[in-house]
Structure formats: structure tokens, C-alpha cells
Image: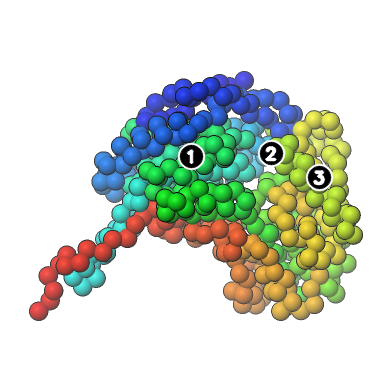
């Protein structure tokens, strides 16, 4: 087992103020793989003090100095990519193929993109005689989840570094080992002391201490809507900026003119990717009522072909869920869907049989069956609650207006998906979906774009230039230039 009980504060690995060991569990076999410490408010105080002290100098670092640091981080991250992929796969259970192809490269992608943004970003702009100046906001508290560890850590750390901010990171205690490795990467890259600090811990203790700390100017949080509300409440008395990327229940509208079988296959695979543990997963598939029978057949075929197995096996499409709590939640909601009369066409409750060449121990690991419900009403709990597992709800619609109405009939608004053989048709429908991003014909994400949600999916944006802007304050300096006569 790895010993990761120290925190990274002020450029050094230090012991916690008070020992509170916590085992990190491999979800594929339920065995501990590392021990971390759960921090306290005292540890947060030390980390914030280090970040506050470092802010004075780092906020004045030149763009060239920040770019040089980011480029050093990129080179070391690249060299440690395989170690990062293996760490992510072990700590949260995603297939090693996904860890290598998407999980690890996502962090690198954000680093490359922020370098491109910073190279051309204008921090000052003269408007008449007034200078509009964008300055780093200050000490930032970064709180990240377990489902896409490096995507979410680097999507916060990279723009914070580019802006000239200092920070305290609290990764999820469920999957903290990749963040631990990332801290080592930043240290090896020569990040000056105090700029980046890491304190492990749980949300009610360390998360709350960060959110409520008077010397933290901004909190950037990714996680559940319930936890996001707690962060906002803790932050309110000190009137700090809070950006949140929260839950989702994204709709995939398959238009009448789409290649139905192809769109269904891609939609099912997208829903099951990362074992359904993606906040933007297309978990509601909206299909013309007249084509539902054909869509059901295509969905069942794709679900039945999904190979569930050990994350280390190259043939595995879907690994376990990340934790026992997540496993129990998904099992409960699958059972509830059956109870209310949703048509179960694939999967269901319980662990799957071993269909991967490596096999599955049916009594160990948080494995679930890739599950598809058809003939779902949008009022059912399985269509409204974020399950965060490989559970797809197929919902029939009457016409295009009905499809858009169903898609928008949700408290969430993180993402949306539209499939159509006619690009202009898809564009028109995409513009009607009330969400922070929309994928046309299964388009991949673009780190130069932005990510964030409407409604209870959060506020603020990450990625690219929009993500950098969140870490900046805008100042007007009146009379900066002489007025023209």
C-alpha cells in the first residue's frame, strides 16, 4: 500500500496537524491501495497562509514567467502519463484504455490550451482615458470530485496558474492519488513555494474550511448539486466568488431524419462511458415514438455487447463504479425504475456475470450491469435524478417541439446532444436546448470551448479563455491616459 498521508504546503510535504488515516479502496476488488490523511481546519489555515504569502509575488509574475512554468509542467506531465493513467484506473476503476486515451490526456489538453490562451490574452485594454485591467483574484480554493480526476483538477489549476493566482486544492478523498502525483509533478517543475498547496480531506471538514475561509477569494467547485449548495452557503458570509460545475441529466434528441441505429449506438456508448460517471452523460435518449421499437432493438444490442470487466484488461469497456456508496445508489435507482413500471430491456439489478476474458468475481468489486430502460416517462425518478451510473432512459416524443420541451424539462442544464443527418436542422434544435453545451452528432468536447451549466448544473465556466476569466478581477483605472483634446 502507498503511504500518502502528507500534505503539500508551501513547497514541502508536511504531516497533518492531527493524524486521521483514511484508506483508499480499489473499486475493482474492494482492497485498500493507499492510506491518506483527512485534514482539518488547522491544515487548511496553514495552506491558505502559504498561498496568501505567495500571492504577493506570484500575482506580479510576468506572462512569460507563468508560461515558462506551465511549459515545464507539461513536459513532466507527459513523462509521467503512464503512471498517471495507472493511478487513475486503480483509484476510481475506469478501464486502463480509457485512462490512457481520455482521462490522462484531458489534463494535458487543458495545459496545452491554457498556454495557447495565455500567449495571446490581453490583461489590459485602454478604453478612451480609462484602463480596463484584469488582475488575479487572489487565493483560490479548488474542490474536485473523483470521476474525471485530472480533467477537473487541471481545468482549475492551469487557469489559476495562468492568471497569477495561488491556490489550495482539495481532491476527492475517494480518488486522491492522481492529485498526489500531480502535486509531485508541480514540485518537480519548480513551482515556487506556496503557489500550489494540497490538503486531503472530506467535504464537511476540509471543504467547508476552504469555502468559509476569509482569506480565500474564490472557490471553484465541481461535484453534486447538493454539495454545491453547501459550498455556496459556507462561502456566502465572506462574499467570495463561487463557481460551480454540478450535476446533469442530459438529453440526447435523436431527430426523425437521423441515422437511427448509428445514433442510438453512439448514444448508448456515450452514456456508459466511464461507467456512466460523467456529469454530462446523455442519460435521457429522446426518440420519435414511431421509431421506438427500432431504437429499443439497437440499444439492447449495444448494451449487450458492452464488456464489463477488470479495469486492467484491454478488452474492458466498462469497469466498476468508484465506491460502495455509488454502487448502492445505482442499485437502488435501478430497482426503483423497475418498481414504477419502466420497461427494462437490458441490464438490471445485481452484479454482472463475467463476460470479459479476465472475468469478474461476482462477490467483489462495485460492478453493475449496463442498464437500459425504455418507454420511460420524463416524470419518473430515473428520468429526473442524476443516477451517475450506466443507466439509460429512453423516452418517446411526438414531434420536435415535444422533444425540446422534454429535454428542457429538468432542473439541470449542463449538456445536451442532437443527432440529425441535416446539420442545419441539428443546429436549430441545439440552440433551443437550455444547457451550457450541446454536442451535434456525437461531437467530442473541445477544450478551446467552455464547460459549465444552466440552472442547477451550476454557474461560471471552465476551459479555455472563459475558464481563465473566472480567476480574474476587472479593474477600471479612470484618468489613466490623457483625454484627447
Viewer-side label of 2, 1: 1
Does dot 3 land on a helix, a strand or a loop? helix
Tell me the residue at 53%/48% (across/down). Answer: 231
Quarter occupied by residue 437: bottom right
Q: Left of 312 or right of it: where is 188? A: left
Residue 393 screen position, x and y as percent: 79, 59
Viewer-side label of 1, 3: 1
Q: Which residue is mark 1?
A: 209
Colour mapping: rainbow
Q: Which residue is mark 2?
A: 322
Viewer-side label of 3, 2: 3
Label ID, residue 268: none
- Return the residue found at the far left: 485
Quarter occupied by residue 438: bottom right
Q: Answer whether residue 24 is visible to the viewer in this image.
A: yes
Q: Left of 391 or right of it: where is 173? A: left
Q: Left of 41 or right of it: where is 348? A: right
Q: If the image is split into quadrants, where does the C terminus sit?
A: bottom left
Check disc 1: other Cα within 10 Å, few if <14, some if 14-19, many if 20+: many
Tell me the residue at 47%/24% (across/down). Answer: 17
Quarter occupied by residue 84: top right
Q: Which residue is mark 3?
A: 331
- Cα distance, mark 3 to mark 2? 14 Å
Amino acid at each position: 500500500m502507498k503511504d500518502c498521508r502528507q500534505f503539500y504546503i508551501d513547497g514541502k510535504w508536511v504531516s497533518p496537524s492531527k493524524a486521521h488515516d483514511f484508506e483508499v479502496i480499489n473499486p475493482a476488488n474492494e482492497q485498500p491501495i493507499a492510506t491518506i490523511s483527512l485534514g482539518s481546519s488547522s491544515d487548511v489555515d496553514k495552506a491558505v497562509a502559504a498561498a496568501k504569502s505567495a500571492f504577493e509575488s506570484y500575482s506580479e509574475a510576468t506572462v512569460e514567467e507563468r508560461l515558462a512554468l506551465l511549459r515545464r509542467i507539461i513536459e513532466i506531465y507527459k513523462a509521467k502519463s503512464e503512471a498517471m493513467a495507472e493511478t487513475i484506473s486503480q483509484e476510481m476503476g475506469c478501464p486502463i484504455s480509457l485512462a490512457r486515451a481520455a482521462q490522462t490526456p484531458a489534463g494535458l489538453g487543458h495545459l496545452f490550451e491554457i498556454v495557447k490562451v495565455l500567449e495571446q490574452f490581453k490583461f489590459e485594454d485602454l478604453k478612451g482615458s480609462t484602463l480596463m485591467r484584469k488582475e488575479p483574484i487572489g487565493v483560490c480554493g479548488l474542490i474536485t470530485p473523483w470521476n474525471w480526476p485530472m480533467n477537473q483538477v487541471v481545468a482549475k489549476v492551469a487557469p489559476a496558474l495562468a492568471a497569477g493566482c495561488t491556490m489550495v486544492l482539495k481532491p476527492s478523498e475517494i480518488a486522491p492519488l492522481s492529485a498526489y502525483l500531480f502535486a509531485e509533478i508541480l514540485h518537480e517543475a519548480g513551482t515556487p513555494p506556496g503557489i500550489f498547496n494540497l490538503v486531503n480531506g472530506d467535504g464537511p471538514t476540509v471543504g467547508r474550511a476552504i469555502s468559509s475561509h476569509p482569506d480565500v477569494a474564490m472557490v471553484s467547485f465541481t461535484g453534486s448539486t447538493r454539495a454545491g449548495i453547501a459550498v455556496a452557503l459556507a462561502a456566502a458570509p465572506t462574499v467570495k466568488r463561487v463557481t460551480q460545475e454540478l450535476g446533469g441529466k442530459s438529453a440526447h434528441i435523436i431527430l426523425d431524419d437521423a441515422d437511427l441505429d448509428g445514433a442510438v449506438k453512439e448514444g448508448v456508448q456515450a452514456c456508459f462511458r466511464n461507467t456512466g460517471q460523467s456529469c454530462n452523460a446523455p442519460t435521457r435518449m429522446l426518440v420519435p415514438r414511431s421509431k421506438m421499437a427500432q431504437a429499443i432493438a439497437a440499444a439492447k444490442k449495444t448494451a449487450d455487447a458492452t464488456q464489463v470487466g477488470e479495469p486492467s484488461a484491454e478488452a474492458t469497456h466498462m469497469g466498476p463504479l468508484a465506491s460502495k456508496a455509488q454502487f448502492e445508489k445505482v442499485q437502488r435507482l435501478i430497482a426503483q425504475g423497475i418498481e414504477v413500471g419502466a420497461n427494462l430491456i437490458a441490464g438490471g439489478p445485481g452484479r454482472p456475470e463475467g463476460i470479459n476474458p479476465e472475468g469478474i468475481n461476482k462477490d467483489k468489486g462495485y460492478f453493475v450491469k449496463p442498464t437500459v430502460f425504455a418507454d420511460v416517462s420524463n416524470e419518473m425518478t430515473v428520468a429526473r435524478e442524476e443516477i451517475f451510473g450506466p443507466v439509460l432512459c429512453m423516452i418517446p416524443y411526438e414531434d420536435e417541439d415535444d422533444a425540446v420541451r422534454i429535454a428542457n424539462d429538468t432542473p439541470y442544464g449542463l449538456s445536451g446532444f442532437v443527432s440529425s443527418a441535416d446539420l442545419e436542422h441539428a443546429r436549430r434544435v441545439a440552440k433551443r436546448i437550455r444547457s451550457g453545451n450541446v454536442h451535434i452528432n456525437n461531437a467530442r468536447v473541445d477544450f478551446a470551448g467552455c464547460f459549465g451549466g444552466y440552472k442547477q448544473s451550476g454557474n461560471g465556466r471552465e476551459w479555455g479563455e472563459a475558464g481563465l476569466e473566472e480567476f480574474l478581477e476587472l479593474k477600471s483605472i479612470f484618468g489613466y491616459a490623457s483625454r484627447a483634446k
